[in-house]
Image (spheres, grey):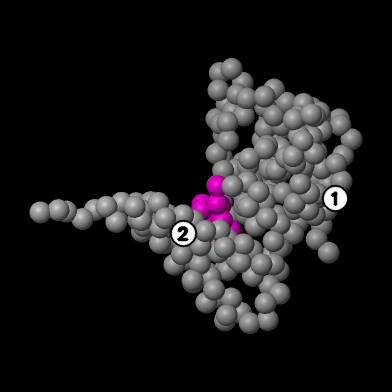
Amino acid sequence: MSAIIRIPIFPLPDVVLFPHTLLPLHIFEPRYRQMVRDCLAGDRRLAMALLKPGWEKDYYGRPPIYPIAGAGEIIQHEELPDGRFNILLRGTMRIGITAELPADKPYQVARARPLPDRYLDANPVALVARVERLKVFYLRILSEVQKGQGEIAKIFSGVKDPGIIVDRIAGAAIADAETRQQALEAIDVARRLAIVQDHLVSVLAHLSDRNAPAERGSGRQN
């Protein structure tokens, strides 16, 4: 059983942090400035939790959050003259929040359990083949939006673990917070891969539809 950890929670409405990805943040609210100071004085860890619908009613208190969150480590920080911070988080793991702790801080703190990847697919060779197909889909999207090999090399450089590859593609390719949360909650790598692949297929279809009229109308008349 994974060890229970105590970790500060930074809840936002549209932000989901995946392990093995980077997230730049600008911290301006006083309570979260204090959170960053506390993190920097300690182990530098905090968790990004997606706010649930209806969060607006209690945003300045204890708004409702999804119980699966992305934990990260502050690897860079800049404190501005007025007390705001620019920080860079490196995602380290998924966590399952087991309890929110009593409010002895101006920000939320939770007890949580690390959630390592699971490989429930009995055929690892087939899973690797599916990951390779996922990479092809992602490369096609990059070519459609005029990004090149440098972007994909940055994501996959030296990485062979299927879970890490899927997380990095999800972090780079999925903009919708709800879909990102679904992928984050998929502890089983094969299930996560399916969610990300479905999204990439949808994006490719949208890009094809967007480009189709231009292609049909590109012929010349003599």
193 horizontally vs 63: left or right: left
Q: Residue at x 31, y 51 (%)?
A: 214
Q: Which residues are the magenta region?
A: 166-175
Q: Quadrant of the N terminus?
A: bottom right
What residue sits right under mark 2 in the picture? 205
In the image, residue 201 lies at what x, y percent? 51, 62
In the image, what residue type sits under mark 1? Thr
Q: Quadrant of residue 41?
A: top right
Q: Is residue 167 magenta?
A: yes
What residue sits right under mark 1 in the picture? 98
Residue that sits furthest to the right in the current view: 102
Q: Residue at x 45, y 59 (%)?
A: 204
Badge 2 crowding class, 10 Å Cα cut-off, few under 14, some 14 to 19, many 20 or more, is: few
Residue that sits furthest to the left in the current view: 222
- Nearer the observer: mark 1 or 2; the answer is 2
Secondary-structure class at tag 1: strand
Q: Quadrant of residue 65?
A: top right
Q: Residue at x 69, y 48 (%)?
A: 71
In the image, residue 155 lies at what x, y percent? 47, 57
Front residue of 124/34: it is 124
* Above-or-below relation of 123 to 198: below
Q: Quadrant of residue 77?
A: top right
In the image, what residue type sits under mark 2? Ala
Front residue of 142/154: it is 142
Q: CA distance from mark 1 to mark 2?
A: 39 Å
Visible residue check, residue 189? no
160 horizontally vs 182: left or right: left
Secondary-structure class at tag 2: helix
